[in-house]
Structure formats: C-alpha cells, structure tokens
Amino acid sequence: MSERVKSKWRPPLALVIGGTLAGVLALPVLGIAWFRLAGNILGWLETAQLFAVMGILATIVLAGLLWRLVLRPVWALTAHARAMKAGRVDTVPPQRFGTAEFGELGRSVIEMGDVLHSRARSLSAYADHVTHELKSPLTSLKGAAEMLHDEGLDPDDKARLLTTIDTSAARMEQLLNDLRSHAAARLETDPGVCDVFETVSRLALQGIEVVVHDSQTLPISEHDLSRVLVQLVGNSQAHGATRVDLTCGSASLHVRDNGPGVADGDRDRIFDPFFTTRRENGGTGMGLSIVRELIEAAGGRIRLEDGPGAQFLIQF
C-alpha cells in the first residue's frame, strides 16, 4: 500500500518555510545593498522600478514553490480523501508529495483509506456469507424440531432427527467460532519478531514433514506465525501432502508442499471467507481468510504462487 506513494527525495517542510522566510528577509537587505553600491548611477525612479521588478519576480518564484510543495499536495490529498469517503475505491491516489512530511502524511491517509474500505467490504461479505452458511443448518434444525412434535414418530426416525439437530447445532457453533476468530485476527495480533526455525520446532505437527531452509527472523509475533503455519500445514496435510518446505528470504517466507496443488478454478477464491473444498468433512472455509488477516495485521501480505504443489509467498 505504501509503495503507491513514490519514494523520491523532497525537501522537508522546515526547509521550505525557512527558505521562504529567508527570501523575504533577504530582499530588503539586497535592495539596500544595491542602492548603496549603485550610488548615483541610478536615480530614485530607476531604483524603485528595479526593486519592484525584483519583488515581483521573487514573489512569483516563492508562490510557485509554495504551490508546488505545499498547496498542490494538500489539495490532491484532500480530493483523494473525499473520493474515498464517497466510496469511489477505484480512485487513483496522489503519487507525489512536495515535502517529506506530506509524503508520510499521504502514505498514512492512503493506507488508512485502504484499511477502512477493506474492513467495510469484509463486514459486507460477513453478512452475506453468514446468512448463506447458517441457512442450511438452521433449516435442518427447524424441520427436525417440527417433526419431533409428531406423537406417532418412529423411534428410529426420532433418533435420526435428534442426530440432525446435534449435527446442525455443532455446525452452527463451529461457524460462529470461526467468525469470531476471523474478526479477532486483525485486532488481537501482537507486535514482535520471531525466528522461523524456532517457531516450527515448538509446533506439535504430526504426520507431515516440515523442513525450514535458511531460517531468518520475521517481523511477526511467534504466536501469530504459529497460527499461520498450523493452518497452512494443516491444509497441505488434509489435501494429501507429506512434506512442507519453508524457505526464508529477506522479510519473506515461501511455503511449498508436495501435494496436488490448488485447482485452477479455485485459485481466485481460496482466501475468501467460507470458501472450502472440504465442506463434507467439516471445513468452514475460514482458515486461509484468518491467515490473510493475521499476516496483513503484521504489515505483510500473502499470495498464491504457481505450482507444483500448493505454494504461498508471504512478504513483509
């Protein structure tokens, strides 16, 4: 997000203001010095005209600098903030700012807008997905409860209905727990750093081999990285992988397994809440969504890479 503001040297605001004040102060001094040096070469009228021309030129130069370095960035940032407020998420943010201070302010405003719109989209998606996902078990509960009122119900049918109620209730409870975990992922994250190899060595991973290459320290807490790795390794294991390789880079982590990989038709949806290919096995589709929230909360991002196997690149 912050890379949307181009990194280029700009004078600090203190230099701009100080230079302007110095120019205003220097003009009369230069004028007096010139008048003294010129002596009787120029008359009063010529000297006044010279001072007027110098003052106009200096005013134009200073006005241009202030417009370029102060006013234009403020107007551009204000226009972008108003566009974001109006919901125009496709608006192009300003890419250049006059001073270093305005550059930092621009990054903060743009990132804040992105985060707020992301959360708004998430809330909207939650409402749609919760309604859809809870409808099925709720319908089963309602139907089973109505049929249980039949006094002549066969004992075997009654047992099946009670099993349906228990299954539907457990499904709803699991969905609600995953929703709470997803919503809390961004809020509960702890700042910190951790070593990848040390984090993996403390995980109780069974039935799958996890190999760490070139272990490095990443800017994410051990607790959050553990949750990320447990979910990614668990997904690999559930899809038939027997080995997961973790390759560390400069503020990055590449995760690769030897499983069948992600189907082409699922690649664009794997991070969406409630999307799962294991619904019949109890999957809720919230795992990778929680992984993405945890990583983004730590200032990073995750994306699916091309195979073989399932490959993810995490960058901070």
Image (cartoon, rainbow, N blue to C red):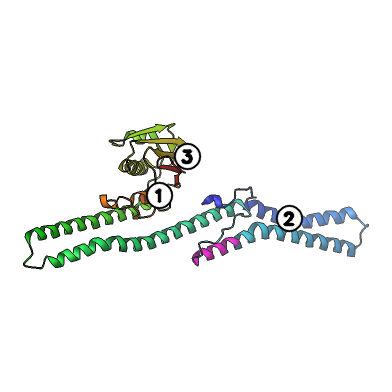
Q: Is residue 4 left or right of residue 119?
A: right
The magenta-colored residue range is: 76-87
SS for dot 1 = helix
Choose mark 3 or mark 1, whichever is in front. Answer: 1
Q: Is residue 258 left or right of residue 16?
A: left
Locate residue 305, reporting x and y percent.
Answer: 45, 44
Most common SS among magenta residues: helix
Disc 3 designates what residue? 251
Locate residue 294, reporting x and y percent.
Answer: 39, 48
Disc 1 designates what residue? 292
Amino acid type, callout 1: Arg
Locate residue 139, reporting x and y percent.
Answer: 23, 64
Instruction: Indicate yes or no whether the magenta region holds residue 150.
Output: no
Disc 2 designates what residue? 23
Q: Residues within 10 Å of mark 3 (few under 14, many from 20)?
A: some
Amino acid type, callout 2: Gly
Amino acid type, callout 3: Ala
Locate residue 107, reporting x and y percent.
Answer: 54, 53
